[in-house]
């Protein structure tokens, strides 16, 4: 399968000269300390390591930054403090339903990656990546589906605390709506955060052929404001496979391109994550996430980094 026929996007060199600040590559906030051992099921946390290795193998222009571990107070802005202390002290179950100390040790780094990436995106006005999945499912005092702490909300609250944002939008491409984000928004009165589970809503109302058209309209501001920071759950679960999913790989690339181009055109910084998505073939999962990184690099990487993109007749 090849996507070398996808149109190259050299327009950013002409229209967005300030994007040359990302000359060193797309900042990806990752370290091995973020990875916890499998907890009796296919662990989404391990996908970060595989994705990073795959991006390196493909020569995609990523710049890896080790995140600082978040302190308990940072995490507790989004969660019940007793829950935070209980999980980290191994007195309460984590999002996997276990009390593995190795999971507890990884959690501050996962949340810290969100905090550092959000600050990087807002300070540069560009983009940052946190290669994790399902960080949106954790609620106020409980985790689920492998999500213990809600990185999206914790990062938004940290930026708000620092006075760096007034409004944040979370664009979710998961097939189902998150229960954690609405729970936290309601409990904490976060009316300055806009949560848009676009994939779940769109496919309930529109045919596949209309999705990309409506997504483009949404990114142009017709449906919701993008705010001072756009957080994107770039889930791979929309990929067509058997009787599930709806978009081909080429359409997935167009989905991501619409988001990145739209945000860049409006000068709205972006933080994006992998989101969920597993298939019998791990390679298919990694290819899907690599398509997102490639489209991100086409928009945000400086012209000097375009050569590795021209060489990627992969996938």
Image (cartoon, rainbow, N blue to C red):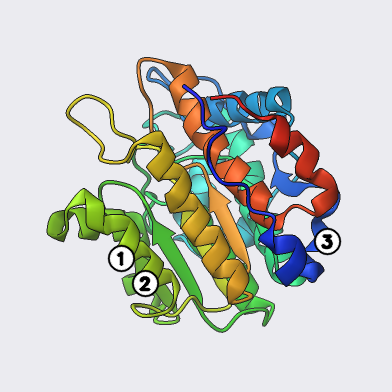
**Residue 229 in picture, x, y percent from top left:** 57, 71
**Res 279 seen here:** yes
The answer for how far apart the CA atoms under marks 3 and 2 are is 27 Å
What residue sits 67% from the left and 24% below the top? Answer: 53
Given residues 153 and 228, the one toward you in this image is: 228
Q: Earlier in the sequence, mark 3 or mark 2?
A: 3
Instruction: Tell whether 144 sits left or right of 246.
Output: right
Can you tell which mark lies on residue 217? 2
| Residue under label 3 | 20
Instruction: Tell whether 211 sits left or right of 24.
Output: left
Given residues 9 and 33, the one toward you in this image is: 9
The answer to whether the residues at label 1 and label 2 have Cβ atoms under 8 Å apart is: yes
Given residues 159 and 94, the one toward you in this image is: 159
Mark 1 nearby-residue class (10 Å; few <14, some 14–19, many ≥20):
some
Secondary structure state at the residue bearing disc 1: helix
**Residue 176 in picture, x, y percent from top left:** 25, 49
| Residue under label 1 | 214
**Residue 54 in picture, x, y percent from top left:** 64, 24
Q: Quadrant of residue 250?
A: top left
The answer to whether the residues at label 1 and label 3 have Cβ atoms under 8 Å apart is: no
């Amino acid at each position: 399968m090849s996507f070398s026929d996808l149109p190259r996007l050299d327009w950013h060199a002409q229209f967005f000269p300030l994007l040359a600040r990302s000359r060193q590559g797309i900042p990806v906030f990752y370290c091995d300390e973020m990875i916890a051992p499998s907890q009796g099921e296919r662990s989404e946390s391990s996908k970060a390591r595989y994705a990073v290795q795959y991006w390196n193998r493909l020569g995609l222009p990523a710049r890896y930054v080790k995140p600082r571990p978040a302190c308990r107070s940072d995490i507790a802005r989004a969660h019940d403090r007793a829950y935070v202390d209980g999980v980290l002290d191994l007195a309460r179950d984590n999002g996997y339903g276990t009390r593995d100390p190795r999971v507890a040790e990884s959690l501050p780094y996962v949340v810290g990656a969100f905090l550092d990436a959000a600050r990087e995106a807002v300070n540069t006005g560009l983009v940052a990546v946190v290669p994790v999945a399902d960080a949106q499912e954790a609620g106020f005092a409980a985790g689920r589906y492998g999500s213990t702490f809600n990185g999206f909300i914790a990062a938004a609250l940290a930026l708000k605390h620092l006075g760096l944002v007034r409004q944040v939008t979370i664009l979710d491409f998961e097939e189902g709506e998150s229960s954690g984000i609405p729970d936290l928004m309601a409990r904490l009165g976060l009316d300055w955060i806009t949560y848009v589970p676009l994939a779940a809503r769109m496919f309930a109302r529109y045919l596949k052929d209309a999705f990309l058209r409506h997504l483009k309209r949404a990114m142009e501001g017709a449906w919701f404001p993008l705010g001072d920071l756009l957080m994107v759950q770039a889930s791979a679960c929309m990929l067509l496979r058997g009787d599930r999913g709806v978009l081909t790989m080429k359409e997935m690339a167009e989905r991501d391109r619409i988001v990145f181009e739209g945000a860049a055109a409006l000068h709205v910084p972006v933080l994006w994550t992998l989101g969920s998505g597993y298939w019998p073939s791990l390679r298919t999962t990694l290819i899907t996430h690599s398509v997102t990184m490639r489209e991100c690099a086409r928009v945000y990487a400086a012209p000097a980094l375009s050569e590795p993109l021209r060489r990627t007749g992969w996938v």
